[in-house]
Amino acid sequence: MAESVYKVVELVGTSEESWEKAASAAVAKAAASLRDLRIAEVSELDLQIEDGRVKAYRAKVKVSFKYEGGD
């Protein structure tokens, strides 16, 4: 079996409803432009607050995909 190399990018997804939807938004956006996604790791969760209320849930997600060269 040949060795493989994977590249990791970090994205921040947002949702007005939940952290799960924020993470899913980040993965969906990555899947639209990257091929062969393998793993997504939620590395941080936070909230955007406005006027004392939660405005948005934010999930920082590390997504890995098979590296095929380039930068």
Image (cartoon, rainbow, N blue to C red):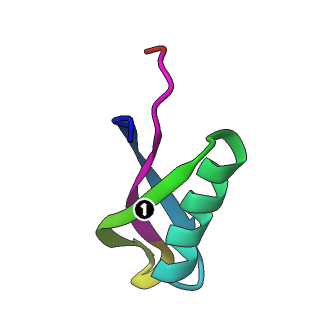
Residue 5 visible to the viewer: no
Residue 59: x %, y % from top left: 41, 67
Magenta stretch holds residue 68: yes
Q: Is residue 52 left or right of residue 31?
A: left
Magenta: main secondary structure equals strand
Q: Is residue 26 above or below residue 66?
A: below
Direction right: furthest residue: 32
Dot 1 crowding, Cα within 10 Å, few <14, some 14–19, many 20+: some
**Residue tagged by mark 1?**
40
Magenta stretch holds residue 46: no
In the rendered image, the quadrant that contains the C terminus is top left
Residue 5: x %, y % from top left: 36, 35
Q: Nearer the viewer, residue 49 or 67?
A: 67
Q: Is residue 56 above or below residue 4?
A: below
Which residue is pictured at 37% across the width and 37% down the height?
Answer: 4
Q: Is residue 18 left or right of residue 60?
A: right
Which residue is pictured at 50% across the width and 25% down the height?
Answer: 68
Which residue is pictured at 44% across the width and 68% down the height?
Answer: 58
What are the residue bounds of the magenta stretch? Answer: 58-69
Q: Is residue 33 left or right of residue 10?
A: right
Q: Nearer the viewer, residue 69 or 63?
A: 69
Q: Is residue 42 above or below residue 11?
A: below
Q: Is residue 9 above or below residue 28?
A: above
Direction top: furthest residue: 70
Number of callouts: 1
State the image quarter where residue 3 is shown. Answer: top left
In the rendered image, the quadrant that contains the N terminus is top left
Residue 4 visible to the viewer: yes
Q: Nearer the viewer, residue 17 or 51?
A: 17
Q: Which amino acid does the dot numbered 1 rest on? A: Ala
Which residue is pictured at 54% across the width and 52% down the height?
Answer: 37
